[in-house]
Amino acid sequence: MVGRVRLALTRGAGRFPGTVVALTLLFLYLPILAVGYLSLSPNAQPTVPIDGVSLRWYGAVLTDSRFVRAALTSFGIAVVAAVGGTALGLAGAYTIIRSQLPSRVRGAVALVIGLPLFVPTIVVAFGIGVTTGVADIGFGYLPVIFGHLFWVLPFTTFLLTARYTELDDQLPEAARDLGADRRTIFLTITVPLLRPALIASALFAFALSFNEFLITFFLAGSGITTIPLEIFGKVRIGATSFLNAASVLVLIVSAVIAGSASVLQRPT
């Protein structure tokens, strides 16, 4: 009898993690599935169940001049954030892992870089806004780009730091013994070994910048409209099928970028 009870408890414990995973996935993806389902409604104001299936709102989104302009703006800012954030992250990772600075100084650098992860985004946005105001920069593309770089820097730095720690220290030393200078070692050994992490860093930074709302909302002013700002403006009107279709398109772009970054293979 005791053996049967123990066996039942063991089987139940084995099922518990799977149940938790299933409930977590349901909690995370059920709202997304609901938005996708309602985006197929032929009516401007969707109802449940929807009255048929139609892709008209996806066509409306892709031909809407305001949405297309906002998409191009988001894409441009995200590209700058991806390239600049990855370059800054590479410099930060090198400073933390490979520089000759004392360990306390390197730890302080890592702490300063990681600060945005522990501060509410709204506080970060407000602080950058105050700083640009004091510097008489005002609002616009430059403050937004600066804010996005500040936001993505911890992610790019620590992603590259994790890869840096796995590199073989003997390879640069061997190249140095053969007469290679630091620049040659960096370009011919370090960068090729870091290439998958560099690409993943750029993709993650792009996705973070492409979907960033609060920092853009505080720093853009009236002359810049990105996709998150455009969607936010339409949310105040109501949950229309147009808004649902626009949200699904943004989700697809973000999922493709994040998926591409996650499947990158490390060099052997």
Image (spheres, helix red, strand yellow):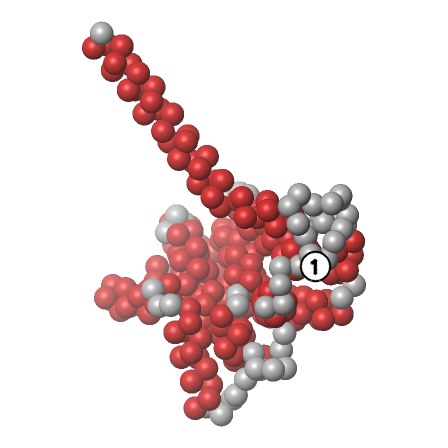
Where residue 192 appears, as percent x and y from the top left, is: 53, 53
Residue at the top extreme, as displayed:
1
In this view, 56 is above or below 233: above
Front-lying residue, 214 or 244: 244
Asked whether, in this view, residue 229 is left or right of residue 23, the answer is right
In this view, 137 is above or below 241: below
Front-lying residue, 169 or 147: 147
Q: Can residue 192 be seen? A: no
Where residue 235 appears, as percent x and y from the top left, is: 60, 65
Q: Which residue is mark 1?
A: 242
Give me the residue at 25% from left, 15% from top: 6
Asked whether, in this view, residue 229 is left or right of residue 59, the answer is left
Asked whether, in this view, residue 60 is left or right of residue 143, the answer is right
Residue 95, picture quadrant = bottom left
Residue 244, picture quadrant = bottom right
Front-lying residue, 251 or 75: 251
Front-lying residue, 225 or 161: 225
Where residue 194 appears, as percent x and y from the top left, is: 49, 53
Give me the residue at 38% from left, 25% from top: 15
How many residues crowd around disc 1 within 10 Å: few (fewer than 14), some, or many (20 or more)? many
- Which amino acid is tagged 1? Phe
Give me the residue at 39% from left, 74% from top: 123
Which quadrant holds the N terminus? top left
Give me the residue at 25% from left, 14% from top: 5
In this view, 178 is above or below 50: below
User: How many labels, in total?
Assistant: 1
Where residue 251 appears, as percent x and y from the top left, is: 60, 53
Circle 1: element type: helix
Q: Can residue 216 be seen? A: yes
